[in-house]
Amino acid sequence: MPHKSRMLDRNRLGALGIALAVVLFFAINILSGALLKSTRLDLTADKLFTLSTGTKQVLSTMEEPVDLRLYYSSRLDELGPYFSAHAQRIEELLGEYQRLSGGRLQLERLDPQPFSPEEDLAVAEGLEGLPLSGDGTQAYFGISGRNSTDDIEVIGYLAPERANFLEYDLTRLVHDLANPDKPVVAVLGDLPLMGTQFNQFQPWHVLDAMYQFFDVRFLGGKQEKIDDDVEVLMLAQPHNIDPATLYAIDQFVMRGGRVLAFIDPLAEVMAAGGGMNPMANPEGDAIKALEPLLTAWGITIPSGKVIGDRTAAQRVSAQVGGRQVVVDYLPWLSLDATHLNADDVITGDIRLVNLNSAGSIQAREAATSALEPLVVSSKLSMAIDTEKIRTAPDPARLIAEFAPSGEPFVLAARVTGAAKSAFPGGPPDGVTSDAEHLAEATAPLNLVVIADADLLADATWVRQQDLLGQQIVIPMANNGDFAINALDNLAGSEGLISLRGRGLIDRPFEVVRAMEQEAEYKYRAKEQELLARIEETEAKIRSLKEEEQKSGVILTGAQQEEIENFRGEMIKLRQELRAVQRSLHEDVESLSTWIKALNIWAVPILIALLAAGLAWFQRIRATRAAQSAA
């Protein structure tokens, strides 16, 4: 009887303990929801839920009051948490913005129902409607802002697909309203930033970003002087520069002007679509056009050479041996943080930059300027003649001929220090100038030179996605951030630099990528050798057949036997080629099989083992309890 009483007390205590645990669980959740509402544990790789120093700086230094209107149609909740969860995050983030702004930022929340005044206001402020049904009913999910001078900035649609860029989008909007005066950036060159006939003359997305942060001016034709209010001159692959314009650029730099230069030995986008200037020669040479300035600045960009990098090569689809395969294309590079200067504010927060057929930048002997690398290749890289890739490039042959230099190449750099004019004797012949000639720079050089122009083209770094009738732009790389960071830094404004470069949607499978590259460079040379031998054998057979047709004389038995031998050799070579091509994928397929098995069986096996372990533990515990009671 005492044993039963003890068992009953133990059961009651157990039930009471469970009840108290449930009560404690709910109490902790309620208290944490009330007291720790603004507390977050951010475990994302890019700290997407942690406000950056750039946002805090923008909000704490606001001089202009800013009023925001967040439009969210409650009917979007009917589509599930896809929109509602994103809207909740935006509200929480804007609440934090309000707190950090010290009251200078105010937020109004509106629910634009169909045919309501709120919907009329949303349409008037430029928000983009989302079609919900066939009867024309639309919902709205966007934000507008206004400052004290009635400047308006709008994000027409707060796309959940851009959730990784939410903080950047919101902070940029607030920054633009709080700082209505924008630095002046002058653009000079033939790069088709305004689009071409191939894309219906749609401006590149990097130009949209430039308009958001800068007062952009395009310079065309002959320039006798760069205006004094220009803070940064952007040289965008200028193929044609007359002596007067060249002298104007030189004197702008001598006066302390800052330059961002995109100078490419092979601008693929120019050859494909023509330049901004219809009279420009797409096949022109920007390096040759700017050579006097490059010499004065103490740098050189080898003409006719682009850089291929084994560790950073992008994967492309190509014909190899009559088969469509995915292969590394050495001149197209995806350069991650290991290739970027982490100590420079321009590249410190950037994760990935894509370059297409980029050249290299080198310091000249006895140069008085200093070259600080911003983007570099790995040691497994080499210079490739542009003629090999200008028309019908062969990615597999480039791999077979790959011979790394053992030294990294500088692909983008900051140039600083003392410099003298490219025109030491004054203006060139035929050029007159009212300004005083400067033979030396009045301030140290402050230039950023990038040996690639294709990085600005949309196809190199963004992807467009259609959702509910809206075109959403999703960055695949930080090319736009890189260019805007450089302009921002040269213009002396760095408030948003720490915000850029976070949250890219594409994350490579690094182990699989390394295995693919190892197989690629192990077998491609052998593959090319076999393809060459097969082609040679086929040529011999064709030659004998053509000789028979031309002469009309039937081939001798020895010649027939020779053809059969050639055919046998070709079959053997093709079998060997297939074995090599299979080897390219065996390791990756083996890894894929192991990963699938792990995903399918690992968790069930782990749960089964855990259950068995718990059952064994309970059994031992019950046995011991029975023994102690006896």
Image: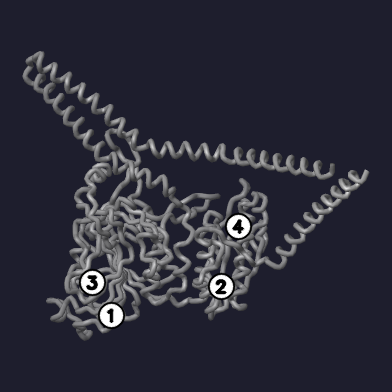
Q: Tell me where residue 88 sits by quadrant.
A: bottom right
The answer to which of marks 2 and 3 sits earlier in the sequence is: 2
- The residue that mark 4 highlights is 86
Q: Give the crowd class for mark 2: few <14, some 14-19, many >=20 residues within 10 Å.
A: many
Along the viewing direction, whichever of 340 and 179 lies nearer the viewer: 340
Q: Which image quarter holds the N terminus?
A: top right
The answer to which of marks 3 and 4 sits earlier in the sequence is: 4
- The residue that mark 1 highlights is 444
- The residue that mark 2 highlights is 146
Separation of residues labelled 2 and 1 (CA atoms): 40 Å
Find residue 222 and name its label.
Answer: 3
Residue 66 image position (x, y, % from top left): 57, 75
**Residue 306, relative to residue 530: is it above or below?**
below
**Residue 104, relative to residue 384: is it above or below?**
below
From the viewer's perspective, is the residue at label 3 or at label 4 nearer? Answer: 4
Circle 2/circle 3 CB separation < 8 Å: no
Question: In the image, is 526 to the left or to the right of 9?
Answer: left
**Residue 181, relative to residue 284: is it above or below?**
below
Along the viewing direction, whichever of 572 and 303 lies nearer the viewer: 572
The answer to which of marks 4 and 2 sits earlier in the sequence is: 4
Q: Tell me where residue 591 sits by quadrant.
A: top left
Along the viewing direction, whichever of 117 and 463 lies nearer the viewer: 463
The answer to which of marks 2 and 1 sits earlier in the sequence is: 2
The answer to which of marks 1 and 3 sits earlier in the sequence is: 3
Q: Is residue 4 visible?
A: yes
